[in-house]
Image (cartoon, rainbow, N blue to C red):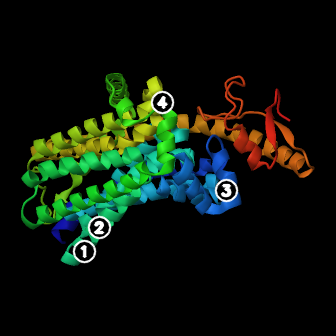
Amino acid sequence: MPPERRAGHGTAAWPAALALLPLGLLGAAAWFGRRVRPGADDWCFLPVVRDDGVSGLVGKFYLTDNGRIANGVLTGLYAKFGVAGHQWYALISAVLVLGVLWGVSVSALGRARLTAPRGVPLLVASMVTAVFLLATPNTYKTFYWPASSVSHTVAPVLACAAAIPLLRARSRAAGNAAVATVFVAGAVMGTLSEGVSVVVFVTLACALAAGHRILTGRRWSYARIWCVAGILGTAAGTLVLVTSPGSRIRRERYGAQGVSMLAPESLAESLRAFAHVLATLLTTWQYLGVVAAGLLLGLLVRGADGRPPARPPHLALLSGTGVLALLVSGWLCTLIAYPVFGAGVAGASRTWNDYLLLYIALLAGAGAVLGGALRERGRRTGVMRATGAAVCAVVCVALALPLARLEDTMRARALAWDSQDRWLRSRAALGAHVLPYTPLPISGMGEPFADHGRKVWPAKCVARYYRVDRITDATRRP
């Protein structure tokens, strides 16, 4: 029997079986997506795409809203299908996130010349995906609301996908293709999400600063060129965004000009808000599921010869660089979001996802290092495997309970939304020009006449969606 087979003998079945828990959780979460109905910004996107197509929404984003061209394309692709696009979005995005993270896990192991039982990379990827999407203060905005997910949840995952060609490159041509890919991906990212672009800039800059001490020779040469290409591509995309009319209008609307963002008050408040976010993340125990998955990886991984791998070189430098990238990028993301959310920026949990994936990756890496250290000692590894598996299972159950409660809320809103939608469409078809509308908020989503009627936005968009002149605040459901 080959050594790599011997290394995984007797352990290949249970990691795959354990992966069924987070996979089942993700499957249930995706199935609940059929309860999603438009709200908040969706009201404004849907009629634009219906009347002017995806290109019309891209033009609106670039010229008047925010300058995010790639964001407009992705938003238009799901808005093109109306309500159905919102219902299918959770499934498609979950598969995308899981597929990318699984691909990164397998590619990273291959690049490091490490092997693991077949189910382990899937277990790690599925646990990371489940925790990333569901262990948040507002799962609806993180996972189910497409407009937020495109900007803050899917965007960092797409940035990770750009690393796969580099990890799998084994020839000069493949290396050149990886460099071209990361440049294009960076350019797209620059017009997709300002926050994720900041994370990309900081992470790649930290990699450039520390990489020469971790990698050597040809590997460092390719990695350095790849990092520079990623930075240049992201800079090009960001330049397109910040010089757009839409971005200028958005900055003026929120007072987010350079001087105001760099004011002492903004710097201090954003730093205080980021400290609050960090405290929340560090005390959210469900993230232990990622550490446990990393622990199992560290316990089970083997070298190409079937023997346990040696301790990673320059571990302190690598860890310190990752933590530095997280702290700097997280604070900068909070700083650029401060003009929009003000003192409540720490509560805008959907924006945490810009740098949250980096935090989760560091947790998984810490778990893998811990698992490797325990394996080197060679004592009670069976107990540690059982403990890691138990933690993964407990975290999945803990994430399932609030998800089930959210599904109940989503189902109630869907029934009310469908009923009101049919009524409004029927009255509009009969020639009505003014119709009453009952707000149906969920998870802090914006709705017309919410907050006891004080928030009118986006009433004009709802009126355009139903092709009437205006809507009024209904005291009861029609």
- The answer to which of 311 and 185 lies nearer the viewer is 185
Q: Please indicate whether residue 57 sits to the left or right of residue 217 in the image.
A: right
Label 1: few (<14), some (14–19) or many (≥20) C-alpha neighbours in 10 Å: some
CA gap, disc 3 and disc 4: 30 Å
- The answer to which of 272 and 25 lies nearer the viewer is 272
Q: Which residue is mark 1?
A: 174
Of mark 3 and mark 1, the one earlier in the sequence is 3
Q: Which residue is mark 2?
A: 165
Please say if the residues under marks 2 and 1 sit with CB atoms less than 8 Å apart. Answer: yes
Q: Which residue is mark 4?
A: 341
Q: Which residue is mark 3?
A: 84
The picture quadrant where one finds residue 183 is: bottom left
Q: Amino acid at mark 1?
A: Ala
Please say if the residues under marks 3 and 4 sit with CB atoms less than 8 Å apart. Answer: no
Disc 3 versus disc 4: nearer the observer = 4
**Element carrying mark 4:** helix
Name the residue rendered at 70%, 58% in the picture: 50
